[in-house]
């Protein structure tokens, strides 16, 4: 029951994860190294969506892209960490319900 | 209005303004207002405006790339610290430290993401403007009923309608033009990419995973273009093609005159300048530094049995 619940709750962010993985595989290499920050904007978007979900994560990512303009100093800019992250991230990047306590 | 068209509205408005301005210009010069070539040239004008607006950003990037020479020793220190370490954590730490250095010294050589992503809505805006014009739908701003109809009916050489795509056309001319454009587009993108990768990358950059990915993509690109080439209207393709040509030319000039320090292109430029006897003074210390760091092999040479050593010797 809980697993189905998790899957439904996590569906929107996992769809975005898939989209972002596709972008990072196909579009990112076209541009080469472009981003003035570490992690790069697309990496940031991926982590933000994984950790904060589709809505908050997208907003965080959009704000970050707006910060990544030619007059920005750049530098290290990590995503705000959640105090408690209840899920697990697969090697591909999908977010799944934690199977065991970590 | 749905959210996407709300976002696209101002972009479409600006695109129409530029298109119509150029159309008026070309008509004033004496071109037939309803001819396809007039509209194609208007699209070319649009590309020129968009790309010219991006030049200051580009120049700024080049400037900070030059300033990179000043922080080269510090950069070298970081690179030496992580030399030969290929694992993910070392790479991450190295990127972090490098970015930190760029920030501290104000020498970030990277282009930033926003301008690149902003070009996508322009592309979709043009797509949407052309699509609307195809149905002789009035635009959101300057593209009035008469112009929209003209644009919608415009055909190149009088036979290839600009709104047609390879897939939905009945005319062979559209297919031929689209095919030629796909070839040109693939070619120009290929050359641009190859120029950057073969000449304008420092040895460190060539070791990154992005580089490997880029190499794979280089050979996948023709497929991508072939796919988009058959589904996009000719008008949109003209935008893309002109933009590609612009990038290629810009890239050529930059690689020739302001190459990335440490890349093959930079060495070629130094050689060119030395031939003319115009080598700048500050180029010398950089070479010295390169000479000093040469030794120090990272991996221990594996011991080899006598027989194998002999075999290897023969091979050479």
Image (cartoon, coloured by chain):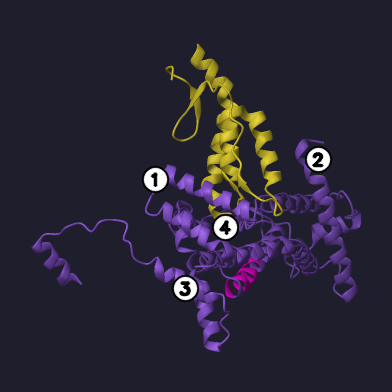
- Tell me which label, 3 or 2, sits earlier in the chain: 2
Q: Residue furthest left?
A: B307
Looking at the image, which is closer to me, B225 or B57?
A: B57
Q: Give the total number of marks visible in the rendering.
A: 4
- Tell me which label, 4 or 2, sits earlier in the chain: 2
Q: Could you tell me which residue is drawn at 83 percent across and 54 percent down?
A: B14
Q: Tell whether B303 sits left or right of A57.
A: left
Q: Colour of chain B?
A: purple
Q: Secondary structure at mark 3?
A: helix
Q: Which tag is nearer the camera, tag 2 or tag 1?
A: 1
Q: Position of residue B78 (x, y in %)?
A: 47, 54
Q: Which tag is nearer the camera, tag 4 or tag 1?
A: 1
Q: Which chain is yellow?
A: A
Residue with the mark numbered 4: B225
Residue B224 in the image: above or below residue B242: above
Q: Which tag is nearer the camera, tag 4 or tag 3?
A: 3
Label 3: chain?
A: B
Crowding around mark 1 (Cα neighbors within 10 Å: few <14, some 14 to 19, many 20+) is few
Q: Secondary structure at mark 2?
A: helix
Residue with the mark numbered 1: B87
| Tags 4 and 3 on a common chain | yes
Separation (CA) of disc 2 from disc 1: 45 Å
Crowding around mark 2 (Cα neighbors within 10 Å: few <14, some 14 to 19, many 20+) is few
Separation (CA) of disc 4 from disc 2: 29 Å
Residue with the mark numbered 3: B287
Separation (CA) of disc 1 from disc 3: 29 Å
Q: Which residues are magenta?
A: B247-256
Residue with the mark numbered 2: B6
């Amino acid at each position: 029951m809980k697993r189905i619940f998790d899957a439904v709750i996590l569906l929107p962010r996992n769809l975005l994860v898939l989209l972002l993985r596709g972008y990072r595989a196909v579009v990112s290499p076209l541009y080469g190294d472009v981003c003035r920050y570490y992690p790069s904007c697309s990496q940031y978007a991926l982590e933000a969506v994984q950790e904060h979900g589709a809505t908050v994560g997208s907003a965080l990512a959009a704000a970050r892209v707006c910060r990544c303009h030619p007059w920005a100093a750049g530098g290290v800019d990590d995503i705000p960490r959640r105090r408690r992250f209840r899920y697990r991230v697969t090697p591909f990047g999908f977010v799944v319900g934690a199977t065991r306590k970590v | 209005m749905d959210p996407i068209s709300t976002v696209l509205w101002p972009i479409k408005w600006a695109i129409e303004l530029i298109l119509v301005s150029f159309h008026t210009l070309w008509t004033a010069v004496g071109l037939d207002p309803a001819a396809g070539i007039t509209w194609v040239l208007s699209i070319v004008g649009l590309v020129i405006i968009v790309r010219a607006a991006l030049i200051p950003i580009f120049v700024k990037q080049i400037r900070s790339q030059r300033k990179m020479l000043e922080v080269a020793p510090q950069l070298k220190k970081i690179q030496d610290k992580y030399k030969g370490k290929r694992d993910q954590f070392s790479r991450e730490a190295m990127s972090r430290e490098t970015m930190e250095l760029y920030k501290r010294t104000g020498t970030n050589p990277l282009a930033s993401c926003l301008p690149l992503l902003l070009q996508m809505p322009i592309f979709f805006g043009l797509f949407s403007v052309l699509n609307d014009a195809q149905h002789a739908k009035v635009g959101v701003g300057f593209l009035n009923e008469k112009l929209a109809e003209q644009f919608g009916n415009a055909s190149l050489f009088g036979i290839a309608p600009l709104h047609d795509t390879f897939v939905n056309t009945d005319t062979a001319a559209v297919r031929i033009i689209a095919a030629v454009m796909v070839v040109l587009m693939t070619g120009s993108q290929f050359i641009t990419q190859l120029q950057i990768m073969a000449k304008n990358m420092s040895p460190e950059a060539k070791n990154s995973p992005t580089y490997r990915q880029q190499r794979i993509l280089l050979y996948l690109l023709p497929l991508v273009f072939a796919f988009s080439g058959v589904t996009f209207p000719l008008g949109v393709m003209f935008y893309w093609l002109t933009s590609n040509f612009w990038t290629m030319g810009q890239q050529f000039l930059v690689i020739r005159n302001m190459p990335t320090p440490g890349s093959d292109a930079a060495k070629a430029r130094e050689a060119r300048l030395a031939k003319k006897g115009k080598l700048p003074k500050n180029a010398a210390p950089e070479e010295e530094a390169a000479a000093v760091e040469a030794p120090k092999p990272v991996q221990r040479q594996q011991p080899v049995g006598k027989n194998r050593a002999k075999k290897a010797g023969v091979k050479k």
